[in-house]
């Protein structure tokens, strides 16, 4: 999450960014179908990445991880 304060606006702007990097785009396309968002190729690292800044997508990610828990130490990070 990023909070941006602009002189031209009274209220701060809040942006969410959710990103997943993979060598292949196969799994990322499935994620995109479920969550929306975009897939792009990063030539410098020879990887694909899924990204979303949409609040609706963020809500679906949270609901998914609440239902299907991560099977690694990242689960603890998610709970924080």
Image (cartoon, helix red, strand yellow):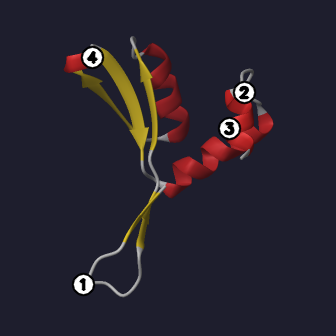
Mark 1 element type: loop
Give how far across and how far down residue 2 sits, in percent.
43, 58
What residue sits right under mark 4 in the picture? 45
What residue sits right under mark 3 in the picture? 77
Query: What is the C-alpha distance between the residues marked 1 and 4?
Result: 37 Å
- Which comes before the other along the chain, label 2 or label 1? 1
Which label belongs to residue 8? 1
Instruction: Kindly identify the residue that appears in the image at 54 percent across and 54 percent down.
Output: 56
Mark 4 element type: helix
Query: What is the C-alpha distance between the residues marked 3 and 1?
Result: 35 Å
Query: What is the C-alpha distance between the residues marked 3 and 2?
Result: 10 Å
Q: In the rendered picture of this protein, how many numbered marks are placed on residues?
A: 4
Q: Residues within 10 Å of mark 1 (few under 14, many from 20)?
A: few
Q: Is residue 43 above or below residue 36?
A: above
> In the drawing, does residue 77 fall left or right of residue 27?
right
Query: What is the C-alpha distance between the residues marked 2 and 4?
Result: 26 Å
Query: What is the C-alpha distance between the residues marked 3 and 4?
Result: 26 Å
Which label belongs to residue 70? 2
Give how far across and how far down residue 26 sits, in percent.
44, 14
Give how far across and how far down residue 67 sits, in percent.
79, 37
- Which comes before the other along the chain, label 2 or label 4? 4
Instruction: Kindly identify the residue that appears in the image at 49 percent across and 55 percent down.
Output: 1
Which-is-in-front pick, marks 3 and 4?
3
> In the drawing, does residue 10 fall left or right of residue 67?
left
Mark 3 element type: helix
Which label belongs to residue 61? none
- Which comes before the other along the chain, label 3 or label 1? 1
Instruction: Kindly identify the residue that appears in the image at 71 percent across and 47 percent down.
Output: 80
Query: What is the C-alpha distance between the residues marked 2 and 1?
Result: 41 Å
Q: Is residue 79 above or below residue 11?
A: above
Q: Nearer the viewer, residue 4 or 25?
A: 4
Q: Are marks 2 and 1 in contact (CB under 8 Å)?
A: no
């Amino acid at each position: 999450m990023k909070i941006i304060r602009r002189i031209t606006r009274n209220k701060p702007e809040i942006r969410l960014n959710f990103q997943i990097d993979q060598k292949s785009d196969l799994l990322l396309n499935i994620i995109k179908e479920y969550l929306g968002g975009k897939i792009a190729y990063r030539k410098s690292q020879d990887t694909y990445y899924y990204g979303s800044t949409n609040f609706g997508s963020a809500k679906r990610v949270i609901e998914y991880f609440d239902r299907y828990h991560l099977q690694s130490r990242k689960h603890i990070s998610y709970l924080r």
